[in-house]
Image (spheres, rainbow, N blue to C red):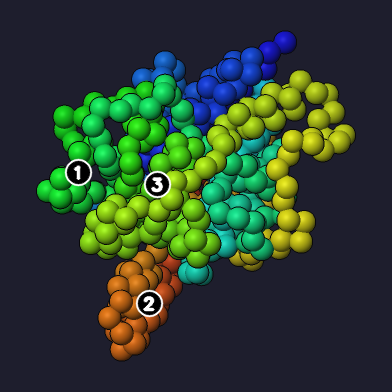
Amino acid sequence: MAPTVAVAHYPEGAGHATRMLAIAEAIEDAGGTVRMAGGGAGTEFVTLNGYDEFEPTVVDYIGDYQGGSLWRTATRSLPASLDRVVDYRAWLSATEPDALVTDDMFAAIAATRCDVPLYVLKHDMPGLYDDLIERTGAGFHTRFQLSAAREFFYPVVWPESGADPSRATRIPPVALDGEPPVRDGYDVVVVPSHYSSLSRIATHLRRQGYDVLDVSDESWDPVESLLPYIRGADAVVCSGYSTVMDAAVAGTPCVVHPATDEQDAVADWLDRYDVTGFAVAPDPIDVLDAVADPPDPPAFENGAEFVARRVTTDLCDPDPYAADSAEEPTVDPDGAAELATASAPVATGSGLTSLAAVPALAAACLVTTGSVLSPTRAGRRAARSAARIGGVARTAGGLLGRAGRRATESVRGGLSAGVGGCVDAIDRVRRAVPRGAPF
């Protein structure tokens, strides 16, 4: 009997949805039935690809912090996170899938509460980050999901290193493919992330005579898959790792202009390992130079098919771990995972309203905020720019970085106190108020 697989994506940024859509389509191609969930910025792409997805409560840590305050983050993002786990748990209980494949930490928590076999897709390992708070956040997410998942898929374009978790399965980049290349005059495809803008760069490229497709233009209507447009261009300019994976599968030279801490970390690793097909451009002028002299094209297979094949095989095999598959990508057995010491046990128990689930969820919310919004980004970017003009400026950048780290400690202390009180209050209300009653 064909397995039914739940596929859930994180809601911040459309790239999470397109990445998980690639896996959903590959699972269906392998004979499985898919149920989609996630909501948020990627919902329109899920709809374009023919899925009617379940939309749990949306979390928006970046929006609540950058567009609001630390208080708004603690009072809105944290309760929303709790609600998102509750919503996912109700959905999983109702649909009773044979497994869940996800890049969403909150869906992973819900799966452990429902005893649904869990498969995780995650690329932002702790070793990517230099900052303590960022490493702690990525470390918690990695440890939790490694301990809870049947298999932990690690889609990457850089080579193996000691930062790879020893129990992760390295796979090629995952991208939502489409029809053959679209060749209608676009020299450069510009793809901003949900939290970046590349419109000025697109304007400058047009002034230099390039035919540019900027997917943030009001005249551009979203399509089922952007990869055919990327495949048909001479170069792609982007901020996020989802488009990096698209470019890798498309075989199109890629210029990366990062805008968030995670994107900075990815860019640093692309630069550190000099990955073929990618140029890192910290400043807009660097983007223009890189497009004028693009790197050699990348060449990668699509990892979505591997994930689908592995999941469907596991679900059909009553003893999937009796022997390792010969098709499994090799992982350095001596590669020690550079994980932060902070971790949390997998929540167990009969209901989310029990306090047993709250510590893991609170830790997840705390480190999510810390890893995405760390104030050290300002210091790190200042240091990177300063390095271009001399040693004195590099020293100034270092001072800014240290100032950012001190600010991080203050933010972390205040947020921790707010998170603790908020979680306790929410849990008391949930136990006291009957299910379905208005709040």
Of residue 201 and residue 81, the one placed in the foreground of this image is 201
Any part of residue 315 in sight: yes
Q: Residue at x 48, y 58 (%)?
A: 270
Residues tagged 2 and 3 counted as in contact (Cβ below 8 A)? no
Residue 186 screen position, x and y as percent? 25, 35
Of residue 158 and residue 133, the one placed in the foreground of this image is 158
Q: CA distance from mark 2 to mark 3?
A: 32 Å
Q: Amino acid at mark 3?
A: Pro
N-terminal-most mark, 2 or 3: 3
What crowding class fits label 2: few (fewer than 14 Cα within 10 Å), some (14-19), or many (20 or more)?
A: many
Any part of residue 347 in sight: no
Q: Residue at x 52, y 53 (%)?
A: 124
Residue 12 screen position, x and y as percent? 38, 41
Location of mark 2 (residue): 401
* Label 2 secondary element: helix
Q: Amino acid at mark 2?
A: Gly
Q: Amino acid at mark 1?
A: Tyr
The image quarter in which residue 214 lies: top left
Location of mark 3 (residue): 253
The image quarter in which residue 421 lies: bottom left
Location of mark 1 (residue): 210
Q: Residue at x 57, y 24 (%)?
A: 26
Q: CA distance from mark 1 to mark 3?
A: 15 Å
Left or right: 216 as drawn, with respect to 368: left
Of residue 63 and residue 327, the one placed in the foreground of this image is 327
